[in-house]
Image: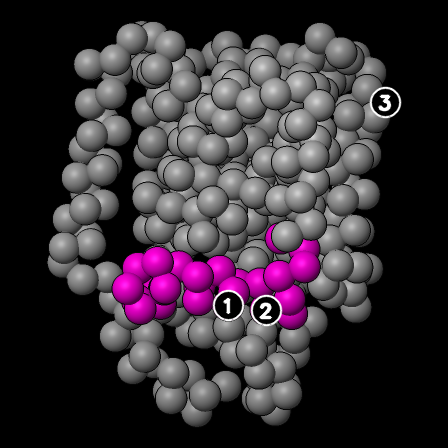
């Protein structure tokens, strides 16, 4: 697809983040790096979990942006990454330093395994298919029996770096991985592969003329998205120090999806943190709302899955309007 890429390449170069925006990102990272020094243990823990959830939001946003599809089942890949890390530690005695890349690689394979038979589905049909994944998570975990720890779950206690405060490691590892994921996604957006996926999403016939089918693009988008989600699961297991079936229910999947809407589908640091903060803090704030909680999130879920054939474009248009006409992510 060299000709199509060459036509799109100048546009990609023009989307390079301007200096003020990059300075804002570095400033935000600096503020996050200082949180353990100025905040108490509760906020250090909460922000650490928030950053892990921010990576999960990026996984859903990536599928929305490059696949043009909505997933209600990413809690499945989140749980897979979390339990993968916990089981690697318990069975092999290895830390999250090994469990994290294992979860990321295995998550990509698992994403392809799911996406291949569902490659003909799109829109609300794919959303319902992914919802089946989310519904199956707790039961699948319980069926694993002692391997997954049953209802009690598993603990993740082994430090990444021996001799360094575990609490600080539980905070700074999600921060470092979040920064790396944001950086890699920014580079991917300007890469040939990223342009291919966007072309296949928006102009499938043109992409097929150059040898790249929409089916291939969707498989690639789902694999990368699932890998990021599994990475987020591994981070959550380490940041929270425990995993259990109750942490990966359908509600978790809905929180992820609505958190992506809160971030306006952004693949940047600020947007991801906004979505991560929503997932981490809003459940606590809404705890007193009782029966209204399912109604609120049911309405939000309905709004997301009915955004239309191009949900990513709808979010981009809304973000551009709120940002004074700027349409970049």
* Residue 144 seen in render: no
Assess whether residue 202 is covered by the magenta stretch.
no
> Is residue 329 or residue 177 the one in the foreground?
329
Assess whether mark 2 and mark 1 are in contact (beta carbons under 8 angstroms): yes
2 vs 3, front mark? 2
Q: Using the numbered discs, state the Cα–Cα distance from disc 2 to disc 3 in whole angstroms.
A: 38 Å
1 vs 3, front mark? 1
Assess whether mark 3 and mark 2 are in contact (beta carbons under 8 angstroms): no
- Which residue appears at 41% of the width and 43% of the height? 272
In the depicted structure, whether residue 196 falls above or below residue 241: below
Position in image of residue 129 (x %, y %)? 80, 51
- Which residue appears at 23% of the width and 36% of the height? 29
Residue range corresponding to the magenta coloring: 304-329
Position in image of residue 289 (x %, y %)? 61, 20
* Mark sitting on residue 143: 3
Position in image of residue 241 (x %, y %)? 52, 13
Res. 147 image quadrant? top right
Task: Name the secondary structure under disc 3.
Answer: helix
Pointer 2 residue: 310
Assess whether residue 324 is covered by the magenta stretch.
yes
- Which residue appears at 30% of the width and 59% of the height? 323
- Near mark 3 (Cα within 10 A), the count class, few <14, some 14-19 or many ≥20, is few
User: What colouring style does the render use?
Assistant: one colour
Residue 188 shown left or right of residue 147 in the figure: left
Q: Using the numbered discs, state the Cα–Cα distance from disc 1 to disc 2 in whole angstroms.
A: 5 Å
In the depicted structure, whether residue 313 falls above or below residue 170: below
- Near mark 1 (Cα within 10 A), the count class, few <14, some 14-19 or many ≥20, is some
Pointer 1 residue: 313
In the depicted structure, whether residue 21 falls above or below residue 83: below
Task: Name the secondary structure under disc 2.
Answer: loop
Res. 254 image quadrant? top right
- Which residue appears at 59% of the width and 17% of the height? 287
């Amino acid at each position: 697809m060299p000709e199509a890429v060459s036509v799109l390449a100048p546009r990609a170069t023009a989307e390079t983040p301007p200096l003020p925006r990059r300075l804002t990102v570095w400033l935000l990272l600096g503020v996050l790096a200082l949180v353990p020094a100025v905040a108490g243990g509760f906020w250090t823990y909460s922000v650490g979990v928030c950053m892990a959830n921010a990576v999960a939001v990026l996984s859903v946003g990536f599928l929305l942006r490059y696949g043009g599809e909505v997933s209600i089942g990413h809690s499945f890949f989140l749980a897979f990454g979390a339990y993968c890390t916990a089981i690697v530690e318990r069975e092999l005695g290895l830390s999250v330093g090994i469990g994290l890349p294992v979860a990321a690689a295995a998550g990509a394979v698992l994403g392809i395994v799911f996406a291949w038979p569902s490659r003909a589905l799109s829109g609300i049909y794919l959303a319902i298919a992914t919802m089946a994944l989310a519904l199956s998570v707790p039961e699948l975990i319980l069926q694993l029996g002692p391997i997954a720890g049953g209802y009690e779950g598993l603990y993740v206690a082994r430090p990444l770096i021996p001799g360094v405060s575990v609490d600080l490691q539980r905070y700074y590892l999600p921060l470092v991985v979040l920064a790396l994921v944001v950086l890699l996604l920014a580079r991917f957006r300007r890469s040939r592969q990223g342009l291919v996926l966007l072309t296949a999403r928006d102009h499938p016939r043109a992409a097929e003329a150059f040898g790249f089918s929409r089916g291939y693009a969707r498989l690639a988008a789902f694999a990368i998205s699932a890998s990021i989600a599994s990475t987020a699961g591994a981070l959550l297991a380490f940041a929270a120090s425990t995993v259990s079936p109750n942490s990966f229910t359908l509600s978790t999947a809905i929180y992820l999806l609505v958190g992506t809407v809160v971030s306006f589908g952004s693949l940047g640091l600020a947007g991801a943190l906004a979505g991560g903060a929503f997932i981490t803090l809003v459940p606590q704030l809404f705890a007193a709302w009782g029966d209204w909680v399912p109604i609120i999130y049911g309405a939000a879920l309905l709004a997301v899955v009915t955004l239309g054939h191009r949900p990513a474009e709808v979010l981009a248009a809304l973000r551009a309007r709120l940002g004074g006409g700027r349409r970049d992510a």
